[in-house]
Structure formats: C-alpha cells, structure tokens
Image: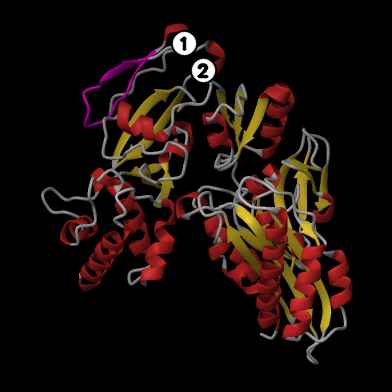
Amino acid sequence: MFPASFGYIAARSVEEALELMAKHGEEGKLLAGGHSLIPAMKLRLQSPRTLIDLGTVPGLRGVRVDGSNLVIGALTVHTDVASSELVRQHLPGLADAASVIGDMQVRNRGTIGGSVAHADPAADLPVILTALNACFAVQSPTASRTLAVDDFFTDFYTTAMNSDEILTEIHVPIPPAGTGSAYAKLPHPASGYVVVSAGALITRQTSGTCASARIAIGGLGSGPIRAVATEMELQGKPLTPQMIAAAAAKAAEETEPVEDSYAGAEYKQHVATIYARKAIEAAVERAKG
Amino acid sequence: MHTEPWDSDLANASFEINSSHMNGGTLSMTAEAEYAAVPINVAVNGIKYDAVVEPRTLLVYFLREHLGLTGTHVGCDTSQCGACTVHLNGRAVKSCTVLAVQANGAEVKTVESLADGDNFHPVQEGFHEKHGLQCGYCTPGMIMTAVQLLETNPNPSDDEIKHALEGNLCRCTGYVNIVESIKWAAEKMRKG
C-alpha cells in the first residue's frame, strides 16, 4: 500500500513550518512521528498534497523542568516520555500511559504532540493529560498562547488549535507533595486502542483524606471526560477502599457511552467503574509515597 | 563514493542509488513535478547510500526494492504485524510506517546486518536452537525486536519478552518457542 503522491518538505524551524503551513493551506499537513498520519494516508483516508515534516526541526524533543511545570517537547516519542526520570518521578501516571500505547515499535516513533494534536477519542495521552491538568503551548505566525486541557479536546479528532498553529510543548504542573497519579486501560484486544481508560491525580492529606482529585475517563466520548462531580465529592473524604469504589462508580455514571461494534454501552460503563477504581487506587498508593 | 547529480527533469525522472558496495543499479520512476522526488542519504547496515526517492516511498520498500535487502518482510502493511521491523538510529521501528525521506541522515539496520559471515547472531542462533519459527515469515521482525530488547534488558523475564513482542505477530502460533529462543539468546549473550 502506498499513500497518494505528495510533496515533502523537511522544515528546519517552527517559523519555517508555520510559513509553509500558510503557503499550502488546507492542502498541507504537518508530519510528526507519522504513526497516525502515515497509516491514514496508506488507506487513502487522508491525501494531503504536501507534508511538512517537523521531525527535522531541532529543539522540539525532550523533557525539562521549567519553574513549577514539567515541559515536554511536542516531538518527544512515547518511549522517551515513558522512560524519562523526570516523568517517572513527578508524573508516574503519564509514564503509565506512554508505556501502554500501541507496541514498542510504535512507541519508538509516535510523538506526544502528534497524539495530542490528532485527538483520537481512543488515544491514551489525552486522558492522562486531562487528569494531570496539562496546558498546550501553541505557536502561530503572529503569536504564542497556551491552551488548558479542559478547553482543548473539542470533538472527535478536533482540538481548539487554529489551523495556522503548531503545538510545540506540553506543560504539566508538577504536583505537590502527597500527590499521586496513575492511568489504567482496557485495550482493544486487536488494535490496542482504548476501549475504556481512566486517569487520576489525587492529592492526599497526611490524615488520609482527599485534598483534591482530578479524574478523567477515556474511550467513552468524543474525547476525555472529566468526572467533575466525583472530584468535588471526593474532596475532604477519607480515601478508604469503599470511598474509592463509590467514587469510581460515580465517575462512570458521569459518562454516556454509546454502543459500537466491539461493546455495548452498559458494558463500557461497567468497565469504566473498574478502570476508574484501578486508576484512583494506584494514584492513592503513590500519593502515600 | 560516487554521487549522481539530482535529476531535475522530474516529468520523467530516473535516478541511481550509489554506494561504495553497489554498481549503481538504475531504477526509473515518474513523478509529477509538484511531488518532487527528494534526495536522501541513509546508512544501511553500515553502508552509506545516496538516493533520490519519491516522498511516498515507504522505508520498507526502499530497503527491499531499491536496495535489494529482502530480509525485511512486508506482512500486514498496516503497522500491526511487525514483520517489517528494522532499527532506525538504534531503535526498532515498523518500516512500513516510516517514509524513506524520514530516514534521511539516519542509520538503518536490517536483519542482514546481524550475522558475521557464517556466524549467526545469538538471537538468530536461539531461534534455530529453540525452534522459534515455523514458516519464518515473521522471523526477521521478531529477531530485530528481540535484539533491541536484549540491548536494553539483558535478562528479561517471560513477561518482559512478551510485552516487547506485542507489536510482532506470528500466525503459526509459535509464541512459546519464540519466547524460549529469546531467553536462550539472552543467556548466551550474558555469558559472552
């Protein structure tokens, strides 16, 4: 299988890539790791006339601390996110998610920015990045801005980025002491994509009660679903196994799954209670330190 | 090393692949001018190649059809099966999902790079010793994935081997022996 013919330009800088995007308009498409785009092009689901390669732009890879944030370059591949000492230390939930994407070969090529910008409703990273309250740094020819994750995933395969913008960095707040994060996923047995997944960020007081929580459910909507009511209810409550199980069940109730060829709605919602519980339990364990 | 000038007449472009070990096998292709062919320089199994490729050329076809390295197989052609696994800058990747132009300036290693003359790589030997293959179609990809695993984890558990092989499918259901083969290789490599 071959993609339809296209022109290829290796961008040398973000500025050059922005100029090329302006020049080629809707017929141009950015290429990062290519692990969503190239398969789609081979199936002729996408046939851009020009590919603008960001893989040749220096400075878009790596993980660093910047003030109170962990900053991850958009072109950082999943393998490097999963094995980063900074990520494992501060955001173990993100390491969980990055290490269960696709398979080893896919993780060696696929990038965090590519996954986020593609906004596949069955992707892993949008879910955990929602729980982790990430921000996305984007650049246009005239301005830079950051978008909060809660406003970012607007629909199936759609983000709040404008068509003239490039995602350059993912900013994730470094959680305070006593915080744990985790990600749990039921993968589709054939594709490895998310059937249902959950991400949790829990800050625990030394007394054992919940200081704050962020919980996101994946696979059950057009993008990650934040279980806002559950988060509020957990605040100030003791993080006992019973309380966690009740919170997980409530988080699942905050979703409205639809049946698809793999599973029914009722099944998916039930599975969501299990994976939400796994994520919250693991986050609480890590919060204990 | 001899380098041909990039032929700018792309309406009927022909190009040569040049390397210090090849006699310039000429391949011709046509491309519309707007989809201009792109010059690339790739080191494959330690040999540097200059080539001019159509942007849509997948790395696996560049290796197989342009360079004649048919050890790398095309299985599903949809990034699932891993038969096309090669190392790109030291990392296992599915070469059916990498454009040849993305390998510009990179080092590629294929299964052909493993044996030293008649001496098999320990992973190849392991697949022989432990009957890690039946039809053999998935084997080059399995081996390239296993080689990367053992480079980063010289003593993997069964579970770690299975996790590493998630992206490699065997339709002869030979997984048990494949895991045994890799354990055999790991032990041999640890002993040195």
Q: CA–CA distance between discs 2 and 1?
A: 7 Å
Residue A147 screen position, x and y as percent: 82, 50
Q: Nearer the viewer, residue B92 or A55?
A: B92
Q: Earlier in the sequence, mark 2 or mark 1?
A: 1
How was the colour assigned to the protein in this rendering? secondary structure
Q: How many marks?
A: 2
Q: Quadrant of the C terminus of chain A?
A: bottom right
Q: Label the magenta part by its dominant secondary structure.
A: loop
Residue A227 screen position, x and y as percent: 82, 64
**Kind of residue at disc 1:** Leu
Residue A175 seen? no
Q: Nearer the viewer, residue A219 or B5?
A: A219
Residue A202 on the magenta span:
no
Tell me which residue sits at (44%, 27%) in the image.
B57
Label ID, residue A251:
none
Tell which subunit mark 1 falls on.
B
User: Seen from this angle, which residue lies furthest left?
Assistant: B118
Residue A157 seen? yes
Circle 1 residue? B10
Tell me which residue sits at (29%, 47%) in the image.
B140
Residue B15 on the magenta span:
yes
Circle 2 residue? B36
- Segment colored magenta: B14-28
Residue B166 screen position, x and y as percent: 43, 56
